[in-house]
Image (tube, rainbow, N blue to C red):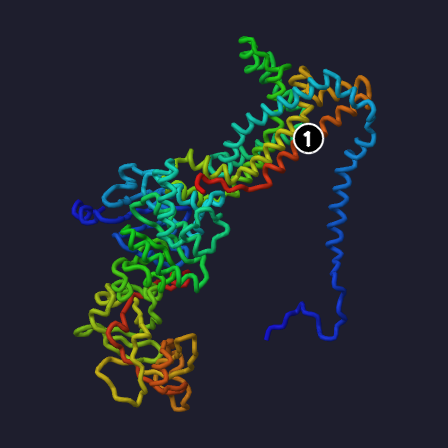
Amino acid sequence: MPSELTISTEQEGLRADFELTRGAFRLGAHLSAPPGITALLGPSGAGKTLTLQAIAGLASIQRGAIHLHGRALADAQAGLALAPQLRRVGYVPQSYALFPHLSVGANIAYGLAQRRDRDSAAKRVAELLRLVRLPGYEARAPRRLSGGEAQRVALARALAAQPEALLLDEPFSALDAPTRAAVRDDLREIALASGLPTLLVTHDLNEALALANRLALVVAGRVIAEGAAQEVTAHPATALAARLLGWGAALDLARRERVAGGVCVTLAGCGQSLLIAEQDCAEGTLASQDAPARLALRPERLRVAHAASQPTDEPALRGVIRSVTEAGPLWSALIALGRRDASGEQGDAGGATLAAPFSAREWQALGLAPGDAVTLALTAGAARLVAADEAGREAAL
Amino acid sequence: MMVDQRAPAAGAPARGRRNIEPGAVTLWLLAALALVYLIAPLVELLLAEPWPQVPAALGDPLALDATRVSALAATITTALVALGGVPLAYALARWRFPLRPLVTGLIFVPLVFPAVVSGIAQLLVYGPYGPVGAFFAAHGVELSDSLAGVVLAQSFVAAPFAVVAARSAFEAVDPQTESVAQTLGASHWRVFWTISLPQAWSGALAGLALTWLRAFGEFGATAVMAYHPYTLPVYVYVQLTGLGTPAALPLALVALLVCAIVIAITLLLTRHTRLPGGLP
């Protein structure tokens, strides 16, 4: 239960602390969305859409409360559940759900307070269409709109009702990739200009990072991390969170030992040891030696060099380049961890591999080829000791 | 490389441009057979029609009265069904409540009951000795053997057509459009009238047209509940049993004509999905 104090500091924006059950699915959402864009990131089936529906009043909560700018939208203990039409929360579902029997203009005018005054309604609709860069679209039929246009009409329709918060469910999933990129900046601009707390659901990390300054990570009905986007992505607590937050690999450990200044870990398979500084150890991995842990890596932050080149002070892993693929603007090198054996083939059998991205220029400057032995220096933020998830649960996702 | 298994092998003789598949021909033949079966009685009716006697038969005041009663009762029936049946269809399509499957099944009861049995069942309720009928009779309103009786009989038998069609139409409405309308500030009432019903309208209208047609042609239940005033089907039966086919045939023509007009109007009304909208 939030105390008196937290409520007063959370006045601005949306605050959701609730639980609900739907069939066998339990959702426990604890997150806040201050003015600005907050991304609700998670795999499909994590409960993201249900979270939006509960906030909009389209699903009822069984415990906890939802507040918007200090106003209670729902409070299970007090038996309060405002009807959706009283919440002033704009909701844009994944399908946009434009009213197919109404023109674009009538769609937008639907939520206007002054819709009965034809002239001022028409003026406001025209304004909103200009805002979403679709001037003159009033008379069009929704089925004649492209995906990107439909999305912007849905956004204009939500804004017309003068909501106090915006909920956007996978706003780009219905769009093809080129349209997606073009529409993304527009959406961000419009949402930010509205000054509204905006909660945006997505399963795409890049989309979340491009649009939002805050991130809430949802897995299996639970918010497992929340905060400033860079903070959240830099500090995963578990291997699963690391994977969902774009960390490339989580390596199994053979041994881990608490030493001064951090934890000394020995990788399973290749047997290499590393010292992980205290600040790079997730909560729980320092204190309890029994809880299984893994070493998460961000391959894009590893400094790759020829094994023969000058060693650095940074802790480093050794590996062998197994193959290289060119994927669009990026090259991806598959690196087997371990030392090259006498035959010159790959590293120790059973050792982990990781895929490291390079720009074409970087790759050429390095002058590496498959079979070369390399060192992988751990720059700041490249490695983190995280809790290993129960195997079954991660596999299920 | 993937090889398309369906592509003809090189050197295989090219088949004719039109690919006639035996299965498709079978389907067409069955469809044609069904159509012939449906049309044959109509054609025969027109062929057997004693055309010279038609004008006189149509001038028969009893026939005109019967037609008027049938049309009036069918219209009142359809209005009543629209009033109660459309909301019932919406409830069945959208709301989850206990015994919902049972209620859904009950709607079909009038369709499977012999119409005469429906009439008897209704007579037990609305007849002069039935609980409802007795109450009204005490206040001077006869529910059986009156226009009210015709409407009651028709409504029972014809309502399922509208309810079933409207329920499907409501089920086809994207529930997200209703949810969004609510978040835009609309009450349930406004959502129903401005979002749900307009989207389901042409389906519901088609169902109501069927209800009107079924009501207009209703015979069994009406004959039991309200033999008088004569409806067109009852009058046709009276003429048939009293004077034989030649007297009944011109009346059948009237029924056919009225039905054709109503079907044409319905098609016209449901053909265009207009885009109403308050705003230009």
Q: Is residue B130 left or right of residue A378?
A: right
In-front residue for pair A207/B136: A207
x and y percentages locating residue B242 in the rendered image: 80, 17
x and y percentages locating residue B18 in the rendered image: 74, 61
Residue B147 appearing in the image = yes
**Which chain contains the residue that carries disc 1?**
B
Quadrant containing the C terminus of chain A in the rendered view: bottom left
Task: Say which element carries label 1.
Answer: helix
x and y percentages locating residue B185 in the rendered image: 36, 39
Name the residue: 78% across, 24% down. B250
The amino acid marked with disc number 1 is Cys
Q: Is residue B225 left or right of residue A210?
A: right
Q: Is residue B219 above or below residue B270?
A: above
Mark 1, residue position: B259
Q: Is residue B208 left or right of residue A60?
A: right
x and y percentages locating residue A351 in the rendered image: 37, 78
Name the residue: 36% across, 47% down. A158
Q: Residues within 10 Å of mark 1 (few under 14, many from 20)?
A: some
Residue A25 appearing in the image = no
Q: Is residue A187 above or below residue B128?
A: below
Q: Is residue B23 above or below residue B119?
A: below
Number of marks in the rendered image: 1
In-front residue for pair A293/A160: A160
Name the residue: 40% across, 86% down. A369
